[in-house]
Image: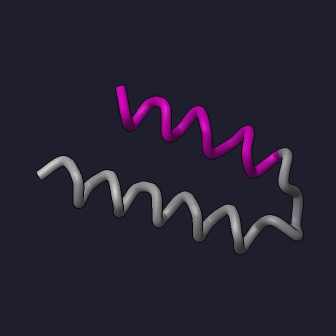
Amino acid sequence: IFLPLLLVLSATTFSALVMAASHSPHQIIQNIFPVAGRQIS
């Protein structure tokens, strides 16, 4: 149950990073990591 959820979360995060990497990497990273931290905890 947990593994598919983790795969979906990581895939979503990865695709979001790739699509926005050329836009503003630092801002994207600062926005994604707090959200991912809240979803994990």
In front here: 30 or 11? 11
Residue displayed at 62% across by 65% down: 16
> What is the span of residues highlighted in magenta in the rendered image?
27-41
Residue displayed at 49% across by 40% down: 36
**Left or right: where 3 falls relative to 23:** left
**Left or right: where 27 falls relative to 32:** right
Residue lying farthest left? 1
Residue displayed at 88% across by 58% down: 24
**Left or right: where 25 falls relative to 14:** right
Residue lying farthest front? 3
- Residue 18, x across and y down, in percent: 70, 70
Residue displayed at 53% across by 39% down: 35
Q: Is residue 16 above or below residue 28?
A: below
- Residue 31, x across and y down, in percent: 68, 42
Assess whether residue 39 is covered by the magenta stretch.
Answer: yes
Assess whether residue 29 is covered by the magenta stretch.
Answer: yes
* Total numbered labels placed on residues in the image: 0
Q: Is residue 7 above or below residue 37?
A: below
**Coloration mode:** one colour
Q: Is residue 34 above or below residue 20?
A: above
The rendered magenta stretch, by its main secondary structure, is classed as helix
- Residue 11, x across and y down, in percent: 46, 65
Quadrant for residue 25, please give it: bottom right
Q: Quadrant of the C terminus?
A: top left
- Residue 8, x across and y down, in percent: 35, 63
